[in-house]
Image (cartoon, helix red, strand yellow):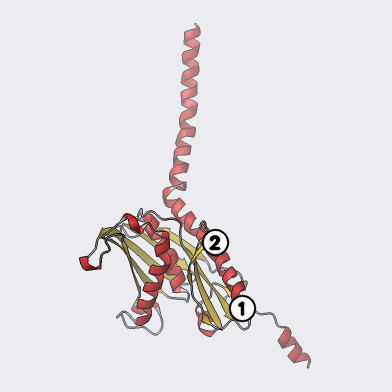
Amino acid sequence: MSKSKRRSRKKFQRVDGRKNDELRPLTIETGIIPNADGSAYIEMGRNKIVAGVYGPREMHPKRLSKPNKGVLRVRYHMAPFSVDPRRSPAPSRRDTEISMVMADALEPALFLERYPRSVIDVYVEIIQADGGTRCASINAAAVALVDAGIPMKDLVASCAAGKIEGNLILDLGDFEDKKGEADVPVAYMPKLEEVTLLQMDGILTQEETIKTIAMAIEGCKQVYEVQREALKKKYGMTEGKIEENELEEEEPEETVEEVEEEEEDEE
């Protein structure tokens, strides 16, 4: 009896030791592909993903273009060595499905009406997979689109929440994704407070579904801050600090000269 009670009271612990509402380590870098109009690299847990953006440019074949707005094309692909065992290099049905899901998640943030008869191509390559690749890919693609100079209403941040062993958790890893009871990927625009992607794989009660979505949105907000910092690092923070340092160095020299001139005028 005592042993069974101890087992039932045993506290749930995740495989990697994270708290239930804790994200995996997340880093994002921009401008890593020189030949692309915009690019980004993301590490989310052990996921390693590269995203490149090309365009807006003329659509080929032209019959696929739209006269009143641009087209967003996304190609999601997992490298053969990204998983164990190795997979076929040919695009799978899953790759095609996630490509469509990503396009639907990113499109609401773009002003595609400004680019009629044009196309914006987003290429995402999974170098190493560790569960939650669609969310990590959306995060990288959104940063790459900003890096390409494409106007956006807001950044799109994505994170998943789910359930394992009766516990609701944030940002599922590979093991939790495969062995868990439910997985709910969400893409979200924090400033506009709009959800652009909501999927669910598994079974949850109504109350659990509401809590899981709320948890995923909080995760998206945390991802959003990392995305902003990555872009600031390249376009804002570094340049601003350099300019401030230059001004601080120049100001004392100018004030000394002005004082000398004033003294000469007085004499």
Query: Which image quadrant is residue 65 in?
Result: bottom left
Which residue is label 2 attached to?
A: 221
Q: Classify mark 2: residues with Cα within 10 Å, few (<14), some (14-19) or many (20+).
A: some
Query: Which image quadrant is residue 113 in?
Result: bottom left
Q: Is residue 189 above or below residue 169?
A: above
Earlier sequence position, callout 2 versus callout 1? 1
Depth check, front residue: 117 or 171: 117
- Give me the disc on residue 215: none
The alpha-carbon separation of the residues under discs 2 and 1 comes to 23 Å
Q: Classify mark 1: residues with Cα within 10 Å, few (<14), some (14-19) or many (20+).
A: few
In the orientation shown, which residue stands out farthest toward the right? 2
Image spot of residue 106 (x, y percent): 41, 64
Mark 1 and mark 2 in contact (Cβ < 8 Å)?
Answer: no
> Hey, what amino acid is under mark 1?
Gln
In the orientation shown, which residue stands out farthest toward the top? 267
Residue 15 in view (yes/no) = no
Q: Is residue 241 left or right of residue 169?
A: left
Quarter placement of the N terminus: bottom right
Which residue is label 1 attached to?
A: 206
In the orientation shown, which residue stands out farthest toward the bottom? 1
Q: Is residue 21 left or right of residue 249?
A: right
Q: Is residue 151 above or below residue 76?
A: above
Image spot of residue 190 (x, y percent): 52, 59
